[in-house]
Image (spheres, rainbow, N blue to C red):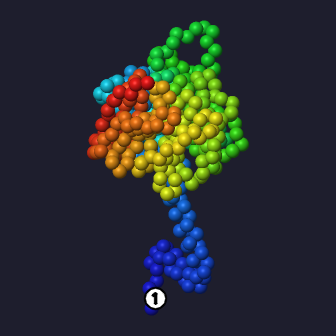
Amino acid sequence: MRARPRSLFGLIGALGVVYARKRPVVCLIAGGALALGLVVALARGPAAGPAAVGGLRAAVLRDGFAVHRAGSNRHRLLELDRGGASRRAYTIERPGELRAVGTQGGLAVAWQDGHKVELRLAGDDKQSSTWGNSVRQLCEGAASSDARFAVGWLEADDSVWIVHGPVGAAPRRSDDDDTDDAVPAGEDGATVAALAAPASAAHNEWCGVASAEQNVAMLWRSGDRLSILMCTKKRCGALPGTFKLPREVSLIGLGCVRDACLLATRAPSGAAHVSYVTSSGRRKWTQPLAASSPTVSIIGYGDRALAVGYAGPDGAEVLRFDAAGASTPLWRDPASHGAPALAWSSGRMLVAHYHGDQIANEVIAAPR
């Protein structure tokens, strides 16, 4: 006598076996399609996802640096002086993604709260502001430099926005200051404001934000197209540069200079590359990158140089790329794993990384 299934899952499995015997061809086709879909999904990976739990990010403060260790429900933030010595620590009990940036008022954090983006000082819950109308998701990365900070998001209508502001000491404001949409944020009356990219009919699936010297770069992805737009402190450009980036290619890192961005990508084969793309959408060069880490850290710094941090077969490494595609080594640690987080300020570069099981923060010389 055949044993009866003792659970709902057992009954479903038994019925599946009976159906497979009656319709073997249909089941074979369906099973093949399911397997193919799974393989394609695994090969494509995310367009560009958030930092993995335990991953590191870095930010520039007006008088030092900050390191953010991402967590699923708890985020660790560490303030450092310009030499890399620990100065102050924070724990943010918050599920989901979080962005950490330096502002005139100090270290600030941003997260999505319902349909809004909340921006607040890490050590003062009273200094906060909310942004957006119907926020769908935070943009990957953040702009954090000596000049400006920015955090971005996608709205439900597919528009891309940033909240941004200065990082250095606040200038004395005159009575005829015409700053638009500014609100106070910080102890010294610093101002932040919102900017949006021009509206588009395309459905945007992803967005990213990065420092671009004195400016902020906004990026968004729709299908097999990636768009780049540069924003000053007053306005964003009228026409973004757009170039083709196939859907199956994962974007695993980005960093920008004044008129171009360096994009790290991974093909379905697993091969990683970095490509230098101008703000008009023209790809100038592409170089292979021996990166096995899920993500790559990229920052623009100094006189049109870009630093690329990644982990490979021989540990973690940071390379300097110039606008022509030539690379030189800046830093390496054979005992480090995972892409190091990078930040640059006034000729010094913070390299935050895992040395074994411990987080190490090193500051190296990186002149303009």
Q: Can residue 341 be spotted in the picture?
A: no
Q: Is residue 53 above or below residue 185?
A: below
Q: Is residue 21 above or below residue 62?
A: below
Who's the residue at 44% across and 78% down the image?
Answer: 6
The C terminus is located in which quarter? top left
Judged from the image, the secondary structure of the residue bearing numbered disc 1 is loop
In percent of width and height, residue 366 lies at 39, 28
Q: Quadrant of residue 357?
A: top left
Q: Foreground residue, 367 or 327?
A: 327
Name the kind of residue labelled 1 in the image.
Answer: Arg
In-image side of 297 versus 241 (left or right): left
The N terminus is located in which quarter? bottom left
In percent of width and height, residue 152 lies at 55, 35
In-image side of 205 versus 119 (left or right): right
Who's the residue at 69% across and 44% down the image?
Answer: 202
Residue most toward the right? 201
In percent of width and height, residue 203 lies at 66, 46
Q: Is residue 168 above or below residue 353?
A: above
The residue that mark 1 highlights is: 2
Q: Foreground residue, 250 or 26?
A: 250
